[in-house]
Amino acid sequence: MAIFSEQIRTMDDLFVHQLEDIYYAEHQIEKALPDMMGKATDAELKRGFKMHLAETKKQIKRLDQVFKKLDHEPKGTECPAIDGIIEEANDVAGEIEDKDVLNAALIAAAQAVEHYEITRYGTLVAWARQLGRRDLATLLGETLREEVATDKKLTVMAKMSANPKAAGKAPPRKSTVRGAATRGSASRGKAAKAANGRRAAA
């Protein structure tokens, strides 16, 4: 059903349509996550996908509650946007042989999904409040916070590990950085003492 369908005449109709859109999306994400988990070679990334799969199942149940409160049967409406994001992720992942580059690509794909969900849930929360349904806004807002948190975790994982490894650079160890700083300070201290000694001799 297109967004400007004749069946959408009121804000309530629009809200339900958006709800059906994200319901479909969540089910597609639930199907895609095990495959992404299987392709990931980084242990932390695998755990992240596993946790998000469990979270997605809870979010679907939360959407079931929203439908029930609206006295609507839970159902999805086909969403070309999420289908396209997942299809593109599968295409890209299928062409990458290097494991580190693949992990970086999987995180990017997961974040594309997260950003779509954040947009949809953000809109639903705003519309629920506008329609005077704060009970629905509370339920949907809980999921929105989870999606934002997941996106932040993926960002940290990408910056601290996946991206540097994919670029051929392991992230610097803190101990190594501190050690280098200490050695640098010691060298500067010795140089300063030597200079003072020369001035005293002069």
Image: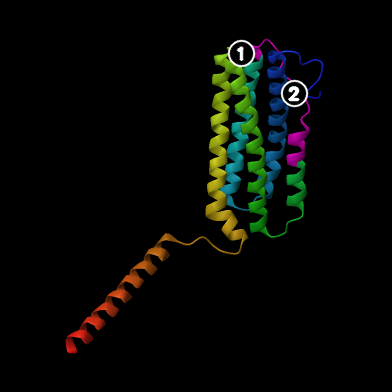
* Vertical position of residue 179 compared to residue 112: above or below: below
Query: Earlier along the polypeptide chain: callout 1 or callout 2?
Result: 2
The local crowd at label 1, few if under 14, some if 14 to 19, many if 20 or more residues have their Cα within 10 Å, is some
Please give left or right for residue 141 compared with residue 36 in the image.
left
The picture quadrant where one finds residue 164 is bottom right
**Residue visible at 54% across and 41% down in the picture:** 152
Residue 139: give x, y in percent of width and height: 56, 21
Residue named by callout 2: 76
Is residue 74 on the magenta stretch? yes
The span picked out in magenta is 68-86
Please give left or right for residue 130 compared with residue 182 in the image.
right
**Residue visible at 76% across and 16% down in the picture:** 8
**Residue visible at 59% across and 32% down in the picture:** 55
Q: Amino acid at mark 2?
A: Gly
Q: Amino acid at mark 1?
A: Leu
The local crowd at label 2, few if under 14, some if 14 to 19, many if 20 or more residues have their Cα within 10 Å, is some
Please give left or right for residue 111 compared with residue 190 in the image.
right
Q: CA distance from mark 1 to mark 2?
A: 21 Å
Q: Nearer the viewer, residue 184 or 165?
A: 184
Res. 59 mark: none
Secondary structure found at label 1: loop
Image quarter of the N terminus = top right
Residue named by callout 1: 131
Residue 178: give x, y in percent of width and height: 37, 64
